[in-house]
Image (cartoon, rainbow, N blue to C red):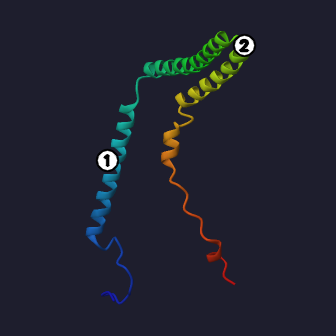
């Protein structure tokens, strides 16, 4: 029971200490927001560098794809030259090189994580429960 005879939590306006705390909290929130906006503005590169990095990424993606296709074609032609089966090895390895180039393109564009990351990031599923334990009639 309080002095007024009413029960319940005290209001924030009657306690000067809580009012001071809320004012300090609002001030701190404002300072944090200002610091975050300042950090995001300082972290952005100039517009000229953004365009240059986009061109560099584009050339990297094209070179990843072209290299995979070219290497596959060269390996296929080399196998055909050794064994005398000219179109078959070239076609097969050119298609394999095309697939490898496409996979490298997707990895370079950060669309497909490497196999080690995919395997390491997901924990194994929990063991299945025994069916006899679940059924109770």
Whether residue 65 sits left or right of residue 49 in the image: it is: right
Q: In which quadrant will I find the C terminus?
A: bottom right
Whether residue 58 sits left or right of residue 86 in the image: it is: left
The residue drawn where x is 62% and y is 12% is: 78
Residue 61, numbered circle? none
Classify 136 as above or below 82: below
The picture places residue 10, in percent across and down from the top left corner, at 34, 78
Q: Earlier in the sequence, mark 1 or mark 2?
A: 1
Residue 31, numbered circle? 1
Report the number of discs. 2
Q: Nearer the viewer, mark 1 or mark 2?
A: 2
Q: Secondary structure at mark 2?
A: loop
Residues 16 and 112: in front is: 112
Q: Could you tell me how far apart the alpha carbons at marks 1 and 2 are, in whole angstroms?
A: 73 Å
Mark 1 neighbour class, 10 Å CA radius: few under 14, some 14 to 19, many 20 or more: few
Q: Would you name the residue on which mark 2 appears?
A: 85
Classify 74 as above or below 108: above
The picture places residue 52, in percent across and down from the top left corner, at 47, 18
Q: In which quadrant will I find the N terminus?
A: bottom left
The quadrant in which residue 87 appears is: top right
The residue drawn where x is 73% and y is 17% is: 88
């Amino acid at each position: 029971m309080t002095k007024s005879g009413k029960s319940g939590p005290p209001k924030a306006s009657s306690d000067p200490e809580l009012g001071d705390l809320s004012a300090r909290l609002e001030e701190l929130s404002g300072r944090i927001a200002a610091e975050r906006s300042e950090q995001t503005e300082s972290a952005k590169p100039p517009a000229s560098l953004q365009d240059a990095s986009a061109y560099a990424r584009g050339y990297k993606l094209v070179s990843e794809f072209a290299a995979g296709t070219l290497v596959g074609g060269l390996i296929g032609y080399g196998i055909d030259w050794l064994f005398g089966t000219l179109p078959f090895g070239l076609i097969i390895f050119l298609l394999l090189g095309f697939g490898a180039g496409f996979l490298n393109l997707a990895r370079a564009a950060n669309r497909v994580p490497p196999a080690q990351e995919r395997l390491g990031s997901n924990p194994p599923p929990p063991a299945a429960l025994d069916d006899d334990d679940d059924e109770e009639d």
